[in-house]
Amino acid sequence: MSELHQEFLPQAYTNTVESGSVAWKSPSNIALVKYWGKHGQQLPKNTSISFTLDHCATSTRLAFDPKSRPGFDITVLLDGKPQADFVPKIEKFFSIAGPYLPFLEDYSFTLHTSNSFPHSSGIASSASGMSALALCLLEIESQLLETPLSDTDFKKKASFLARLGSGSAARSIDGGLVVWGAHEEIPGSSDLFAIPYPDMVHEVFRDFCDTVLLVDTGEKVVSSTVGHGLMHDHPFASQRFDQAQSNMLAIKPILATGDLDAFIALVESEALSLHAMMLTSSPYFILMKPATLAIINKIWSFRKETGIPACFTLDAGANVHLLYPAKHKEAVRELIESQLKPHCKEGAYIHDQVGAGAVRL
C-alpha cells in the first residue's frame, strides 16, 4: 500500500448522520501544458496548467443511507439510467480513498450524475465527474466532523481526493488557471493536489473563450488510462517530460504580459506533442480524425488572413478546443458557423469560457 499522507487523514468523527444527500457541480478543464504519463498513486510525471471551463461540467447528487454489512455499496445513475459499468471504477476509487474517508463503508451510496457534454469523448468527463464526487464525499465528511475544514483545506483535500480517481480531476476544483504537479519555479505547487496559478495573469487571459468543436462524440478507441500507461516504456518519454517542465517555465512571462503570439505557439505545440506521444507509443494509436486536421488547418488560415489570435488545443481525443480572447468572440464565432461547423458531428459544438470553479448545489 502506498504511504499515507497524514495531512489528509481526518480527525475522529464526532457527529452521527443517519442519511441524506449532497450535490456539487464541477467543471471540466482544458490543459495548456499537458500531463501525459504518471507514476505511483496517480502522480504526474510533469507539471501541467489548465483553464478551468464553465459550461462543460458534471452535476452530481450523492444520496447516502446507513448500512451494516462490510464492503462498498454503490449505485450509479447517469442521466437517470443505471450504469453498472461505472461501479468498478468508483469502487476502486473508494478503496484508494478509504483511509482518507473512513465512513465510506458505513453507508450505501446512490450517485446521480449528469454531464453537460458527451461522456468519454475527450472533454475530460472523468475530471469533472471525479472532482464532483470528491466534493460530495467531503461535504458528507464535513457533517461528521466536530470542526469542518476551512475553505482552503476543503479545496486542497478535494483536489487530493479527486486526483486519486482521475489525475486531471485535481485541476477541476478551483477556477481560472490551475497548476498540478510540483515545479521548483511555482511556489506551492505539488504532485498531490492542484493549486490556483499563483503568479501574475494578464487580463486578456481572465475571460478567454473556448469553443469545443465536437468532431466525435463517441467513446475513444484508447482510454486515457491506457494512454498514460504506454508512457512507461515510451522511447521519447523523458524528452516529453523535460519539454513540459520547460514549457511551464516559458508560459509564466506569457501569462504575465499577455503575449498572445507566444501563447499560441506554446499551446499548439503542446497539443501536437501530446498526440505525437500517441503516434509513437507501442502500440501506437491515433485519436485525431480527418475532421480534426481540417479544423486545425482552417484555424491556421483564419489566423493568417485576419491576424486574430485564435488557436487550437486538443485533449486526448478528436475534438478541437478553439481558444480565443473574448474581444474577438464575434469574428471567431462567424468562422465557426461558416467554416468549422460542417466538420463537427451533426454540426455540434459547445461555446465555453474560463470559469470560476466548482460550486455546491
Image (cartoon, grey):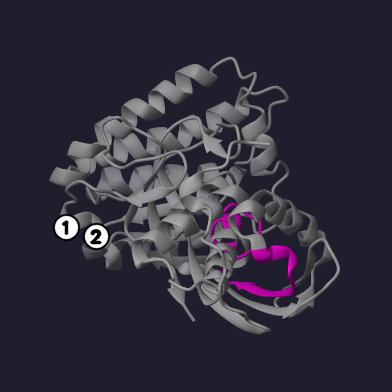
Q: Residue at x 59, y 52 (%)?
A: 122
Q: Residue at x 65, y 18 (%)?
A: 233
Say above or below: 144 vs 298.
Answer: below
Q: Residue at x 32, y 26 (%)?
A: 246
Question: Is 125 included in the stretch rendered in magenta?
Answer: yes
Quadrant of the image occupied by residue 229: top right
Whole-number angstrom distance, CA of label 1 to CA of label 2: 5 Å
Q: Residue at x 84, y 63 (%)?
A: 70
Q: Are marks 1 and 2 in contact (CB under 8 Å)?
A: yes
Whether residue 298 is visible, yes or no, is no
Q: Which three-letter amino acid code belongs to the residue tagged 1?
A: Glu
Q: SS class of the residue under badge 1?
A: helix
Where does label 1 land, which residue?
A: 203
Judge from the rendering whether residue 74 lies leftward or rightward of residue 46; answer left or right: right
Where does label 2 land, which residue?
A: 206
- Image mark count: 2
**Nearest to the observer: residue 80 or residue 292:** 80
- The picture places residue 35, in percent across and down from the top left corner, at 49, 37
Mark 1 crowd level (few <14, some 14–19, many ≥20, 10 Å Cα): few
Say above or below: 141 vs 223.
Answer: below
Say above or below: 234 vs 125.
Answer: above
Whether residue 14 is visible, yes or no, is yes
Judge from the rendering whether residue 321 lies leftward or rightward of residue 200; answer left or right: right
**Nearest to the observer: residue 312 or residue 190:** 190
Instruction: Give the extent of the magenta segment.
Output: 103-129
